[in-house]
Image (cartoon, rainbow, N blue to C red):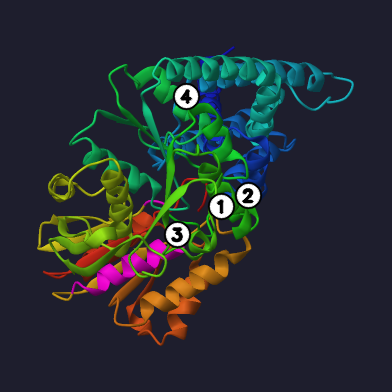
């Protein structure tokens, strides 16, 4: 074989490896669940990325084209796509777990076997007299890349029995560790939004008196929790704060069956992941699986500002309810809330005349709510207000959740880029409204994973942020929610000259630069996750 074709095969090999990496990343983001992965695929199967490979396949099989030139053209296409894959920024990059390596290895084995089999079959001269071995092999590689998602799904099905046995072994080991620590207090944290922030705030406050451990990052799945227990939980830990995520009914119960929490907080119930939950009722039922799992001597803390939470009665366990906008039915509430560029102040009010002021560097009503929920648990844990006040004052914003920073040129950046939701998006817009020293610029691609309500909710968000003097310039990013947001913005009578459309985040950044003035404030509201465009 000539060096020319060896180079082409190497290029195609690298491209195939990177292509599988992307497929595995999407499979991992969909929780290794074939149903979720298939739903994502249905919306992306006809993407331009795969269509380019289809075109390259037809080019390779064109009988009128000199095959070395066709092979070169295919290699150049792959070579052009490789740096695009490498430069692609991922909000949730592929985590190379042992499971990913097993899947990757099996995908490679299936791909090599399939390419060999295809080359042998297509090489049957009685069927394909017009093609030689190079054309057939390259065509086979392209076909594997076009159908790489099939390979990933087949590999997962083959590995299912192995993964089940490994999963159960890890779960049993985590349960054994928890049984060996009978004095460990486990606090479950869940909600459609606010759970990650509440988890961090709760850890910072409780750490003033207790040795605490939290599930790191987005380790809010059953196996993420199990991994935290097996790798990080120590005999001297007194409190384990366990974030519990869910995308379908039963997900929270599955985690509770592993850790058996004695305290639970539900931060909110909202229209998140409706593509899998199908209805708000299912979301509420799933989030309250945490409360349903609590023992009789435990207690629940529930955010009454969330209407579904306020409407959900709890009879199995003692319950403390809190709120910021609504005081009805609340045991604890925040009042005298004031925002500024330096942060927020508010007064915590509770039973038996409890009242004390707190000051935080955090911004937004959502952060006040999350802080209040954490404060309620701290108070119920026996902490005094002075220690709580000191801890709250030292809390730094959670990255990408209404965090604020200054950049050269006296520009304020409000970063609320992580997984926006309708209530949080409105709160972020309200925060932006308080900054009046210069231009207020909103950059957003809208909200996703809202099922059939996605267009309506994005339309309402566009109308909300364009009204009430909340923003001076709005930059809408991407095509996913563009029409809905623009329609809402125009409905509010927003100045059309101040509405800007950008195809992607990089273009938005370029359009932003000439708009900045000293004193300007820029709000980044939800940078879309990798599974959307």
> Cβ–Cβ below 8 Å for labels 4 and 2?
no
- Going from N to C along the chain, the mark reached first, 1 or 4, is 4
The residues tagged by marks 1 and 4 sit, at their Cα atoms, a distance apart of 23 Å
In the rendered image, the vertical position of residue 513 relative to residue 506, given as above or below: below
Q: Mark 4 or mark 3, which has the lower sequence index?
A: 4
Q: Which residues are magenta?
A: 418-435
Q: Earlier in the sequence, mark 4 or mark 2?
A: 4
Q: Position of residue 62 (x, y in %)?
A: 72, 37
Residue sitting at the far front: 352
Q: Which mark is residue 421?
A: 3
For the residue carrying disc 4, how many other residues have a C-alpha within 10 Å: few (<14), some (14-19), or many (20+)? many
Q: Residues within 10 Å of mark 1 (few under 14, many from 20)?
A: some
- Disc 4/disc 2 C-alpha distance (Å): 24 Å
Q: Is residue 73 left or right of residue 374?
A: right
Give residue 500's position: percent from left, percent from top: 37, 72
Secondary element under disc 3, as helix, strand or loop, is loop
Pointer 1 and pointer 2: residues touching (CB < 8 Å)?
A: yes
Q: Secondary structure at mark 1?
A: loop
Which residue is most to the top? Answer: 1
In the depicted structure, whether residue 23 falls above or below residue 268: above
Q: CA distance from mark 4 to mark 3?
A: 28 Å
- Which residue in the structure is indicated by mark 4? 226
Kindly report the distance in space between the C-alpha atoms of the residues bearing marks 1 and 2.
6 Å
Residue 194, position as x, y percentages in the image:
38, 52
Q: Which residue has dot 1 on it?
A: 273
Q: Which residue is mark 2?
A: 276
Reply yes or no: does residue 429 show up in magenta: yes
């Amino acid at each position: 074989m000539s060096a020319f074709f060896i180079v082409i095969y190497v290029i195609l090999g690298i491209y195939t490896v990177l292509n599988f990496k992307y497929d595995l990343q999407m499979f991992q983001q969909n929780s290794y669940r074939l149903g979720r992965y298939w739903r994502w695929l249905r919306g992306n199967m006809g993407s331009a990325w795969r269509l380019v490979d289809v075109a390259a396949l037809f080019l390779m099989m064109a009988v009128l084209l000199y095959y070395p030139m066709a092979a070169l053209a295919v290699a150049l296409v792959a070579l052009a796509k490789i740096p695009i894959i490498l430069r692609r920024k991922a909000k949730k990059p592929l985590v190379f777990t042992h499971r990913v390596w097993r899947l990757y290895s099996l995908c490679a084995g299936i791909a090599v076997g399939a390419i060999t089999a295809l080359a042998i079959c297509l090489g049957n001269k009685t069927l394909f007299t017009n093609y030689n071995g190079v054309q057939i092999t390259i065509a086979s590689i392209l076909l594997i890349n076009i159908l790489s998602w099939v390979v990933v799904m087949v590999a997962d099905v083959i590995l299912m029995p192995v993964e089940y046995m490994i999963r159960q072994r890890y779960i049993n080991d985590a349960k054994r560790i928890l049984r060996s620590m009978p004095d460990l207090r486990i606090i479950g944290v869940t909600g459609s939004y606010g759970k990650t922030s509440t988890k961090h705030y709760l850890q910072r406050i409780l750490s003033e008196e207790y040795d605490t451990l939290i599930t790191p990052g987005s380790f809010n799945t059953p196996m993420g929790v199990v991994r935290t227990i097996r790798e990080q939980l120590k005999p001297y830990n007194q409190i384990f704060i366990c974030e519990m995520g869910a995308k379908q009914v039963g997900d929270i119960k599955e985690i509770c069956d592993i850790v058996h929490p004695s305290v639970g907080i539900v931060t909110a119930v909202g229209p998140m992941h409706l593509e899998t939950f199908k209805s708000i009722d299912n979301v509420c039922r799933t989030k309250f699986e945490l409360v349903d799992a609590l023992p009789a001597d435990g207690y629940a803390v529930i955010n009454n500002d969330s209407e579904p939470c306020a409407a959900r009665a709890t009879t199995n366990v003692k319950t403390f309810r809190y709120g910021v906008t609504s005081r009805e039915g609340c045991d604890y509430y925040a009042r005298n809330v004031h925002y500024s560029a330096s942060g927020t102040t508010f007064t915590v009010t509770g039973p038996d005349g409890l009242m004390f002021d707190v000051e935080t560097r955090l911004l937004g009503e959502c952060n006040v709510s999350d802080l209040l929920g954490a404060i309620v648990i701290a108070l119920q844990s026996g902490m005094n207000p002075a220690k709580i006040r000191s801890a709250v004052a030292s809390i730094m914003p959670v990255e990408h959740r209404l965090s604020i920073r200054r950049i050269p040129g006296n520009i304020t950046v409000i970063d609320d880029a992580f997984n926006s939701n309708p209530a949080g998006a409105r709160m972020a817009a309200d925060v932006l409204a308080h900054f009046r020293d210069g231009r207020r610029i909103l950059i957003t691609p809208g909200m996703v994973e809202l099922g059939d309500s996605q267009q309506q909710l994005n339309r309402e968000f566009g109308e909300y942020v364009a009204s009430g003097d909340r923003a001076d310039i709005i930059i809408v990013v991407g095509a996913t929610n563009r029409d809905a947001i623009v329609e809402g913005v125009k409905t509010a009578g927003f100045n059309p000259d101040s509405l800007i459309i950008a195809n992607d985040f990089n273009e938005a950044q370029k359009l932003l630069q000439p708009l900045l003035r000293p004193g300007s404030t820029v709000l980044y509201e939800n940078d879309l996750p990798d599974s959307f465009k």
